[in-house]
Image (spheres, rainbow, N blue to C red):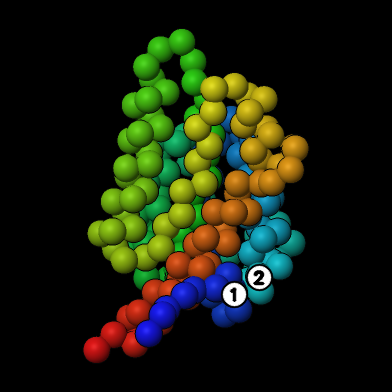
Amino acid sequence: MIHEGRADGDGLKVGIVVARWNERVTRALLDGALGALRRAGVDSGAAGEGDGVEVAWVPGAWEIPLAASWMAESGRFAAIVCLGAVIRGETPHFDFIAGGAMRGIADVAIRTGVPVSAGILTCDTSEQALERSGLKGGNKGAEAALAALEMARLREKLVVDAP
């Protein structure tokens, strides 16, 4: 038997955690995620205020895993979408923040069993981050939202269909 999820959000509740740091980029990622969720059938309302989406803003990428953990542990969400942008500077700070945030997100998903997608951009320049947030083709926030929906639907199949 082959199991696959699909990006169908009908009836699902999705949590989104967004970092305020690099807000020009993260707001564009959020817009992309909300648009993708709405097109997939999630009730996201006019700016993410519908019953199907809750958005939590955090200071930066480092804080994303903790807020994602709170959302996952609440039992209210079928999936969590994490959005942020970490831009390389002249010190190793980038490596610590980006690596820690990504490890933390993976840890939340594995520990709770709730699908948590990582829409955190790790770029060398602000221009690269803007490009990946929808300025020039593609929006990684939208991609992260669709991945979260697909994993939520796959989880339904695997958990329900498991012997």
Total marks in image: 2
Relative to residue 93, is residue 32 depicted above or below? below
Residue at 57%, 58% in the rendered image: 145
Instruction: Judge left or right: residue 155 versus residue 163.
Output: right
- 144 with respect to 115 (left or right): right
Q: Secondary structure at mark 1?
A: loop
Residue 56 position in % (x across, y down): 51, 51
Q: Which residue is mark 2?
A: 40
Left or right of 106 on screen, residue 124? right
Which quadrant of the rendered structure holds the C terminus?
Answer: bottom left
Mark drawn on residue 8 = 1
Instruction: Give left or right: position of 93 versus 32.
Output: left
Q: Disc 2 on helix, strand or loop? A: loop
Question: Which residue lies at the image location 74% right of the left edge and 37% below the top edge?
Answer: 135
Q: Which percent across, then down, holds residue 138?
A: 69, 46
**Mark 1 crowd level (few <14, some 14–19, many ≥20, 10 Å Cα):** some
The one of 143 and 20 positioned closer to us in this rendering:
143
